Amino acid sequence: MTQLTLVIGNKNYSSWSLRPWLALKQFGVQFDEIRIPLYTPETTSKLRQYSPSAKVPVLLHNHQTIWDSLAICEYLAEEFPHPHWWPKDKIARALARSISAEMHSGFQNLRQNMPMNCRAKLPGKGLTLEVQKDIDRITNIWQEFRQKFAAEGDMLFGKFTIADAMFAPVVLRFVTYDVQLDSISRKYVETILELPAIQDWIQAAKNETEVLSQYELYSNPI
């Protein structure tokens, strides 16, 4: 094993696992991957071998354990400072942290009613008034920062940052549930989907065989 190991859950369902995994891939940091299927009788005991929270994701590095997706990304940004995990500009960096924290702690209606499920196609499912409010806030964020940083690249702050990693699972949700989007948000979704790492994640998710009923609210299990 390398010094850096990321413990993740099912790629089809685990949105939190995707965030640091994608950041590591985008910044070319080599790491080993341990996948532990979630919600099995053995899951908790297996995860407790790596993390006191018994949740994914977990980063193992130099005999240290870091858990929680945003904490992992922050740690990686300090440990591997050469790639620009956050925007260079101080104000942009603060804004990127702000929307990343908002994503980290918010949008509960979207999470509950449109769980991540890369294998499924569920147009229109889960779209309540409260979910639409979450969608509107997310697309407002995307519009604001894509317009503000359009000259610097196709990501939220021009170049890929942790903020894009934090919103990547939302992109996959919007595809699964065929959420109707404005032109700026559609273009951003397309940009994230074109990342080779995202394509690899989606393919791996489709190859998984586990079925978790709490994430299959509207579809027939495979």
Image: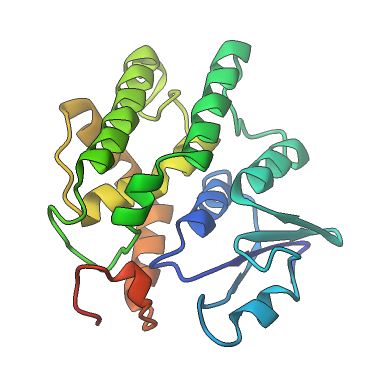
- Residue drawn at point x = 60 percent, y = 63 percent: 56
Query: Is residue 214 at least partly visible in the picture?
Result: yes
- Residue drawn at point x = 35 percent, y = 63 percent: 202
Relative to 128, say whether 90 is above or below. above
**Residue at the far bottom in the pictured view:** 41
Q: Is residue 136 left or right of residue 49?
A: left
Q: Is residue 21 left or right of residue 135?
A: right
Relative to 87, say whether 79 is above or below. below
Place residue 139 in its image quadrant.
top left
Query: Is residue 194 at least partly visible in the picture?
Result: no
Q: How has the structure been colored for display?
A: rainbow
Relative to 119, say whether 174 is above or below. above
Relative to 172, say whether 149 is above or below. above
| x, y percent for residue 119 | 27, 68
**Residue at the far front in the pictured view:** 129
| x, y percent for residue 116 | 35, 59
**Residue at the far right in the pictured view:** 63
Place residue 197 in its image quadrant.
bottom left
- Residue drawn at point x = 31 percent, y = 39 percent: 191
Looking at the rendering, in which quadrant would you find the N terminus?
bottom right
| x, y percent for residue 172 | 31, 52
| x, y percent for residue 6 | 65, 62
Looking at the rendering, in which quadrant would you find the C terminus?
bottom left
